[in-house]
Amino acid sequence: MNNSKLIFVTGGVMSSLGKGLAAASLGAILQARGFSVCIRKFDPYLNIDPGTLSPYQHGEVFVTNDGAESDLDLGHYERYTGRDACSSDYLTTGRVYSDILSRERKGEYLGSTVQVIPHITDEIKRFIKKNDEDFDFIITEVGGTVGDIEGLPALEAVRQLRNEQGYHQTMFVHLTYIPNVFITGEQKTKPTQHSVKALLQAGIQPDLLLCRSSQPLHENIKGKLALFCNVHQEDVIAALDVTNIYRVPLNYSIEKFDERVCKHFLLNPLEHKISENWLKKWENLTKSIDNPTKTINIVIFGKYVDLEDSYKSLKEAITHAAGENGVKVNIIWCNAEKSKDIVSDIKEADAIIVPGGFGVRGTENMIKAIQYAREKKVPFLGICLGMQLAVIEILRNVAGIKNAHSTEFSADCAKVISLMSEWIGSCGNIEKRSKTDNIGGTMRLGEYPCKLQEGSFAKQIYGEDLINERHRHRYEFNLSEFGEALEKTGTRISGRSPDETLTEIIEIPDHPWFVGVQFHPEFKSKPLSPHPLFCSLIRKAAKF
Ligand code: GLN
């Protein structure tokens, strides 16, 4: 098999144009033409991974099956291509420097001067080309915006790859922005001209311009961009704003983006036609999202709600399940920390979700919201922190353990949720973590199996005995000490680790829909195969 063809996606003019979505959508249409595709991201910042970054800085931390804490764009790649991302699909400059410097300390460079070129650039090239015999295409998104100082080594690395692999084995796709200005709505090409100039300074001539714009691109604008930016006019592709992001791959195809990519790589598009089945599925998906028969309200009662990207996968998982059921979900984002009147904030809810989170801020209000959901019989899903707080709420208010808490928030409490190293008794074979460990990279991360209890609601929802879900947390429910007290309240522990030490799912049988999960189901939801938990929650909230 030949080595993969390499596509590099860079971004110009400004951030937040949706490079990740563009890479994911291109991946999806190339797959629809029968090609195997891998999508990767290189992020130029100096953090080793985004694990310690505030969601407000960088949005959600997306967790892969093999436990990498990565950028939320990997979530887009998974959702659009269906291929599970892995830790080798994500790299930051920080990681490259950290690896190189530890090798330098061990004397592995044998006395040579360690430099950005070739040492850093070689690492980036190795990352991009890893397993390049396994895929027809590897699409690499270069994070940041062209012109950023920290992005230069990555641009240099992809420039070298063009030189090494040749023109018809590599392609530079540059995502840019065409503003409509003034009352006339005139489309302006100058910002794009400047960002292409910045690329040229790095030695890269883009092969195709993908132009974000709120209005269709006029032919004369395409001509002007082609002339000034030195590309064929057919390679100026419009990427119009959409209200439903699952339209993007279909729109790209209408704009012939995939055809131009095939031509660049000397592949005949007629010999690699788009699968009719794929087209039908994506068209049906977008239609069902756009034509709901009923609207419901779901309150997300969390800490980072002021930036929706903090809960990107959760929002998408709701969209997938809503589309599947012909429902429009009106998400009411409720800031747990700032909420003054919880009941009035959540009284419109057809369902309440308390999502994952870290730190004490807002947790007492989340516990009150959970109590409301439990007592007023409002469908409730607690995810990770949400599940931990649900256990605390039930033990406090039903079992009467008034000081039930998590040791993440209080040292002096009934340690219902705690680090396994704090438990009395055996922890099985699972890694022990303690408070003195580094914060970065010390969590239960990635996919773990969970055994579902016979006859439970969870088993009915999943329809399977053993499931695998992704985790990202330090603390656990102390089952050996408080399991009995919890079950005495009527709460069922319906999902456990196969060795029975860890609690993965709790549910209240005497409630219309009350489920807490220690994992993050949202990471596994795909538009064409929505997650069963979200589907079930939405059906209950919509009273189907
Ligand atoms: N802060 C909690 C823990 O570390 C929950 C984490 C989460 O919700 N992802 O266990």
Image (cartoon, rainbow, N blue to C red):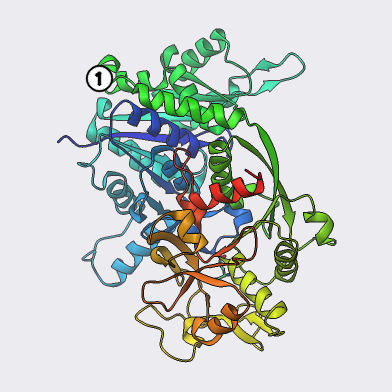
Look at the image and tell me whether residue 535 can be seen.
Answer: yes
Residue 254 % position (x, y): 46, 17
Furthest-top residue in view? 220
Q: In which quarter of the image is residue 497?
A: bottom left
Quadrant containing ligand 1: bottom right
The reply to whether the residue tagged 1 has its Cβ within 8 angstroms of ligand 1 is no
Say above or below: 281 vs 273.
Answer: below
Looking at the image, which residue is at 55% across and 84% down?
A: 484
Most foreground residue, 282 or 231: 282
Furthest-bottom residue in view? 424
Residue 403 % position (x, y): 70, 85
Q: Quadrant of the C terminus?
A: top right
Q: Mark 1 points at which residue?
A: 266
Q: Which amino acid does label 1 sit on?
A: Leu
Say above or below: 496 vs 15.
Answer: below
Q: Is mark 1 on a helix, strand or loop?
A: loop
Most foreground residue, 489 or 314: 489
Look at the image and tell me whether residue 204 can be seen.
Answer: no
Q: Quadrant of the N terminus?
A: top left
Residue 126 % position (x, y): 27, 49
Most foreground residue, 422 or 215: 422
Looking at the image, which residue is at 47% across and 15% down?
A: 226
**For the residue carrying disc 1, how many other residues have a C-alpha within 10 Å: few (<14), some (14-19), or many (20+)?**
few
Say above or below: 430 vs 377.
Answer: below
Residue 278 % position (x, y): 38, 27
Looking at the image, which residue is at 59% across and 83% down?
A: 485
